[in-house]
Amino acid sequence: MNRFLSLFIVVIISYSKSHAQFNQPWQGKKCAVVLTYDDALNVHLDNAIPLLDSLGLKATFYLSGYFPGCRERLADWKKAAAKGYELANHTLFHPCIGNIPGREWVKPDYDMSRYTVQRMVDEIRMNNVLLEALDGKKKRTFAYTCGDMKVGDSSFIQYVKNDFLAARAVRSQMHRIDQIDLYNVDCYAVNGETGAQMIEWVKKAMETNSLLVFLFHGVGGEHSLNVSLPAHRQLLNFLKQNEKDVWIAPMIEVAEHIKSWKYNDSLKTAIQKATQEDYNRMLGKLNIQSTRPGPSGNPQAPNASNTDESKASPYTSLPDPLVLNNGIKVTTAKMWWQKRRPEIVELFDKEFYGRVPAHTPKVSWKVISSKDTTIGSIAAVTKNLLGHVDNSSYPEINVDIQLTLTTPKQINQPIPVIMEFGFVFPPGFRMPPNPPGTAVAKSWQEQVLQKGWGAAVIVPTSYQADNGAGLTQGIIGLVNKGKPRKPDDWGALRAWAWGASRAIDYFETDPSLDAKRIVIEGLSRYGKAAIVTMAYEPRIAIGFIGSSGAGGTKILRRVFGEQVENLASSAEYHWFAGNFIKYAGPLTPNDLPVDAHELVALCAPRPVFISSGSPTVEGQWVDAKGMFLGGVHASPVYQLLGQKGLGTTEFPPLETALTDGEIAFRQHAGGHTTGPNWPTFLEFASRYFNSSQTKSKNFYEREWFKKLKLNQYEWVAQLDCMPHHWVRKAMR
């Protein structure tokens, strides 16, 4: 791969980590509306702006600098700019082509048919000078005068494209974001339409997810193309009332958004292509011609996933976590630690999540910034940290781990810390609103800080992209020196877990933290990452596993919700080892040598809280009962180690907390979030962190573990995510 292509892939993957996945057309709303007013008329200042001010709406005013309404009221336009209205370019003298029927009003001096391209360009740029004197800005949009786009046979816009983000035309059309030409943006010119008629245009834009640009001249008079004041007010009132569904912004903001969206969309296409190439390459290594397609998560789709519990369990047995590969029953804790647990780890490494390389690069941490802040009513300090991964072995790939740590401002002794795998959303992204009447809950960070604990957020996509194209980049690509994976190499879930371990390395150096009381938390794909991290990282004391579904704590043999075929598709295969694809063809989930309950068992005897949402709100894709059963069938291992498991095999009613044992479960009444379960989880965690047995001790330092007469190396050596320096430390 040549250096330029490698650099290009780095750029598209790194930029798209937090953007392409959430590239919503109109910032999560149904459509975008731009209100534009042409020709710098007095009524714009006297009628339009006061109404816009009263409603808190912003618009774009296309000014022709020589028009009386502009040159005689420069101070008023300057005030308008200061309020946030866009002053945009409509040329200096407003020339139009005069030698066509109906244009007799065009003055000969300003007849574009007599212009040269250079004269047109000069007048446009001179108007920009005037506008900059008014608002101090250089970014600008343009509107074609009379919709005329050519001087003679030459399009003049190509000569001034670098001066403008967009150019508005005058055709009465609306388009979806992917169909918009930024230098030929269509609009609806208003001339006598009623408020109801204009509102219908908005409704059409909402139905078609389109951009609608209004072009006003007269507003209550002053121009032959006019909208009445009542009609204008009716439209603006409707827009204000529907702000939750309609994005109303000046042209400059919308143009910047469209440009960004198109760029992100092109990155998404490039990533999809590179991902498919990597997927096909892995299929070739596995000698697989094709895989079975997975079901749809859309309940209305013809191939919708099963949600009928009576059809969910065609399997007759699960792999027994307490039976060795040779068929011998595990009867003691020592057999578990010395024999059975290493067998299960090996199977997960080879067939499921992949092997972490024996040698991974060192990470050097530094504090980028530290600032005092307030979370709710709690005085706190937030540190932004960056973990630079040593890339001296392959400088072409740079990897940095992004981490934030927030702690109470006043700390009297080392405190526990909860680390979340955090999503990063692009600017303008909106989470779905809570149902009406929903009480405003405290953020999880505020709840954690109230207990006097620390809250950390690690960004997994900062060091390993969430797509197949990224497998030759990030930490996986760095260790492989930019080459594709082997079938048993680690996938993104193990890579994300590796990054969490490196964060714990940092926590161990921070005297304000008790690094022996660490919680890992994650939701959805990061719920999968959280349970994988806990299974492989012994320094984690408790896991809070949110809606992890298939690939997490859900039994994969269940035919309910998301299936192995979905996980092994080109959309999700990168989370796992390449070998995992085999179980979507030619093998089946019933051929898996391990299942999710054994992943939970690898966490034993440490506490694990499994969280899910309501089937009617979150949906049934994550399979709440399947996750519950992951806890049920891991319980015998906890019991063998002297701890209590889930304590029941009966799936509980909604909002019933099962928290008596070291495996806990609660299905809240909300959606795809851990939010409603935070209070219950924190109460659960407090039981351990407030205990004298657990305070300042990892579980392998506790008396019951010492009685096994296992040295710490026998435990740690199983966990190939542990760096050698930590193994040596554990042996001391």
Image (spheres, rainbow, N blue to C red):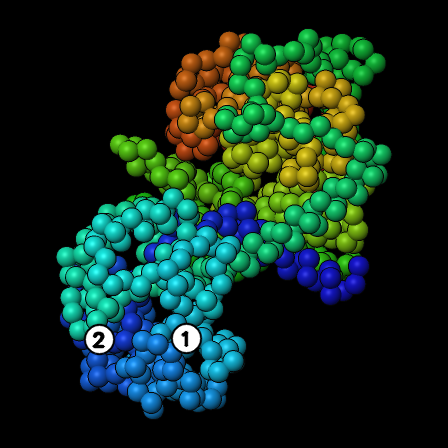
The residue indicated by pointer 2 is 41
Q: Residues within 10 Å of mark 2 (few under 14, many from 20)?
A: many
Q: Say which quarter of the image contains residue 574.
A: top right
| The N terminus lies in quadrant | bottom right
Q: Residue at x 76, y 19 (%)?
A: 591
The relative height of residue 423 versus residue 648 in the rendered view (above or below) is below
Measured from the top left, where is residue 247 in percent x and y?
35, 53
Alpha carbon of mark 1 to alpha carbon of mark 2: how far? 21 Å
* Kind of residue indicated by mark 1: Asp
Residue 364 occupies quadrant: bottom right
SS for dot 1: loop
Relative depth, front residue between 113 and 411: 113
Which residue carries the number 1 mark?
Answer: 148
Residue 394 vertical placement versus 696 (above, below):
below
Q: Nearer the viewer, residue 649 or 276?
A: 276
Marked residue nearer the N-terminal end (1 or 2): 2
Tag shown at residue 397: none
Q: Residue at x 28, y 82 (%)?
A: 105
Q: Position of residue 311 (x, y in %)?
A: 59, 12
